Image (tube, rainbow, N blue to C red):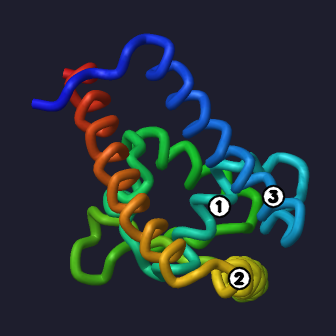
Amino acid sequence: MEAQLDATAQEELVGRLLNTFGRFRRQIARLVGRSFDQPGVSASQAEFLRLVGRNPHISVKAAATEMGLAPNSVSTFVTALVKADLLVREPDPADRRATRLSLPAPVQRTVDETRRRRHGLVAAALDELTADEREQLIRGLAVVGKLTGILHEHEQRTRR
């Protein structure tokens, strides 16, 4: 087992991690704009709409799992977004107890255009990195993915 970080180094690493990802998300939002810059649509709801846009006809359960949210939180999103005409909820033809989610055509176009702009912006920035920097980023993202999984496991244990 590797040595633990001392308290000061750990605090600095946590701060850098949270600040870096927060700044990254804010920078993208400033350059591309929010997908749903309208009253009543929170950042989490916009993220949820982007998820549904990438996965038309996704189930509520699958959407909750993908976002790492409790199904009742997703149900709250669904109810509010359907009421705002930003989301379509339909029974699953294979299982009437399940619900499938999709976006109305104008909302889908907004999500698609925002995704295209975000991807283009980040792709152009990645092109400015060296091959070695891109490899380091790939390795770092694998570690962030593992860290996210560990945090999810902690969350699941606290819910039991």
- Vertical comparison of 133 with 63: above or below: below
* Discs 3, 2 touching: Cβ within 8 Å: no
Q: Nearer the viewer, mark 1 or mark 3?
A: 3
Outermost left residue: 1
Left/right of residue 94 with respect to residue 54 in the rendered view = left
Residue picked out by circle 1: 82
Please name whichever residue, 144 or 63, is drawn nearer the observer in this view of the structure.
144
Task: Name the residue located 71 percent from the left edge and 55 percent from the top edge.
Answer: 25
Residue 32 location (% of width, % of height): 85, 72
Q: Earlier in the sequence, mark 3 or mark 2?
A: 3
Which amino acid does the dot numbered 2 rest on?
A: Glu
Quadrant of the drawing holding the C terminus: top left
Q: CA distance from mark 3 to mark 2?
A: 17 Å
Please name whichever residue, 40 or 84, is drawn nearer the observer in this view of the structure.
40
| Mark 3 residue element | helix
Left/right of residue 61 with respect to residue 73 in the rendered view = left
Q: CA distance from mark 1 to mark 3?
A: 29 Å
User: Quarter-wise, where is residue 92 in the image?
Assistant: bottom left
Residue picked out by circle 2: 128
- Vertical comparison of 67 with 73: above or below: below
Left/right of residue 30 with respect to residue 48 in the rendered view = right
Residue picked out by circle 3: 27
Which amino acid does the dot numbered 1 rest on?
A: Val
Q: Nearer the viewer, mark 2 or mark 1?
A: 2
User: Quarter-wise, where is residue 159 in the image?
Assistant: top left
Residue 134 location (% of width, % of height): 51, 76
Outermost top residue: 7
Please name whichever residue, 40 or 65, is drawn nearer the observer in this view of the structure.
65
Residue 109 location (% of width, % of height): 74, 88
Task: Name the residue located 21 percent from the left edge and 24 percent from the top edge.
Answer: 3
Question: Can residue 120 be seen?
Answer: yes
Tag 3: Cα neighbours inside 10 Å, few (<14), some, or many (≥20)?
few
